Image (cartoon, grey):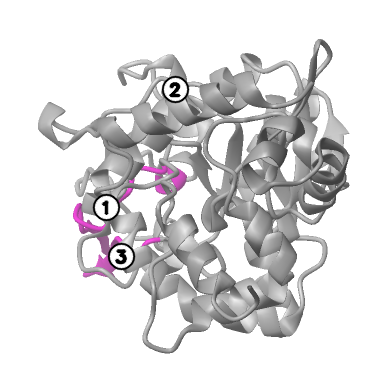
Amino acid sequence: MGKDVYQKLAKHLDNLPGGFPPTESGVELRILRRLFTPEEAELALHLTLIAEEPRVIARRAKLSPEEAARRLEEMAKKGLIYRITSPDKPMRYMALQYIIGIWEFHVNDLDVELIKDTNEYFPTLFDKSWQKGPQLRTIPVGRSITTELEVLSYEQAEELVQAQKKFLVAPCICRREHKMVGKGCDKPMETCLVFGIGADYYERNGLGRIIDKDEALEILKKADEAGLVLQPSNAQKIVNICCCCGCCCQVLKNLKRYPKPASLVSTPFVAAVDTDTCEGCGTCVERCQMEALRLEDDCVVLDPDRCIGCGLCVSTCPTESLTLLRRPEPEQAEVPKNMMKSYIKLARERGKLGTVNMVQMQIKSKVDRLLASK
C-alpha cells in the first residue's frame, strides 16, 4: 500500500477542482508523504466532494463505522480532510484540495521543509490549475468606491461581512511561511477572515479566534491602511476574505510573473488616471501590489493589463487623480452564486467533473448511504 498510495492520492487530488498536477521532480509526492501516513492516504481516497457520515465512508473503505469515525476525525484535526458540523446532523467529512485547503489548514504547524516543497510546487500548480480558473476574486477596498461607480453587493467587502453571522480571524499563511524562512514583510499577520462553516472548521482546529462583526470590519480598514489587496472566495456567497500583499501572497506573486495578470483574475474593475491633476507624488506606485503603475515625467502611468482593480491606489491618492471604472461587460468574469457552484465551474474549466462524473458520484454516495450500517 505504501509504495504507490501517494501516487493514487495525487491523482485523486488532481481530480478535485483546485487540482494537484504532477511535476517532473515529484515534489507533489514529497508534500503528500510529509502530510499523510500511508493509512491516511488510503482512507482519503474514499472521500469525495459530497460530505458524508463516517458510516458511509466506512463501507467504502471496508472499515468498521467506529474505526472510520475515529480516523476521519483525526485526519480532520490534522487539516487533511474537511469536517462539516451542524446541530441536528451527525458529523460529515469530505475531500479537501491542497490549495485552497490542506496547505492553509497547516498555518499553525508549518515546518521549513514543507514550506520549501510547497514554494517549489506553487508555480506548477498556478500555471496548470489556477490560471484556468481562479479560486479567489479581487474586490476594491471600501474607500475607493465612489457613488458614481456601479457596484454590486457581492463586490463590496463591507457588504459581504455584513451578510455573515459567524466571524473568525486567522494568521495569513503566506506572510507566516515567508517569516519562517527569513523573508516577507511587516504587514499585519492576523488578517485572514473566515465565515460560517469555514469559521466552524477553523475554530474546532484551533486555527484562529472568533471575533465579532465590528472587529471584522476594522480588519478591512487596517488592510486598506496597510496596502493589502482584498481577495474573497470566487462566489457571491463567500466563506473567506484574504488580505494579501504582493511580496508574500502566493497568488499575487505568481500573477506578477505574467505580462497581463488582469486577464487571469476575476475582477470587474480597473483603475483610471487623470493626468491633468496628478502631481506625481508616487504614493500609488508604492501601494500597487501588481506593478501596474510607474512614474514618468512626474506623472503616473497605468498599465491596465496589470491592474486587478483592488482600489489601493485610489483610496490614498491626495489629488483624487485615480478612480475605479467598471470593465467592459465581456471582460467581467461570471461570479458563481455559491462555493459548490464555484468548485464545479473550476473543475469543468480544468476538464474535470463532467456531468457523467457528477451523476456517478451522487449515485454512488446515495447507494452507500442506503447500504451502510447505522
- Amino acid type, label 1: Lys
- Amino acid type, label 2: Gln
Q: Does the image show residue 214?
A: yes
Q: Which mark is residue 236?
A: 2
Q: Secondary structure at mark 3?
A: helix
- Amino acid type, label 3: Lys
Determine the residue positioned at 60% across, 51% down: 101
Q: Which residue is mark 3?
A: 128
For this orientation, the residue located farthest to the top is: 88
Q: Report whether 220 appears left or right of 13.
A: right
- Neighbourhood count class around disc 3 (C-alpha, 10 Å): few under 14, some 14–19, many 20 upward: some
Dividing the picture into quarters, in which one does residue 235 lie? top left
Q: Secondary structure at mark 2?
A: loop
Determine the residue positioned at 82% across, 50% down: 71
Please say if 98 is above or below 365. Answer: below
Task: Please report whichever mark, 3 or 2, sits nearer to the chain's N-terminal start.
Answer: 3
The part of the chain drawn in magenta is 290-313
Q: Where's the C terminus, which quadrant?
A: top right
Q: Does the image show residue 321?
A: no
Q: Which residue is mark 1?
A: 132
- Residue 283 is one of the magenta-drawn residues: no
Q: Secondary structure at mark 1?
A: helix
Report, in whole angstroms, how far the alpha carbon at label 3 lies from the one at label 2: 25 Å
Dividing the picture into quarters, in which one does residue 146 lie? top left
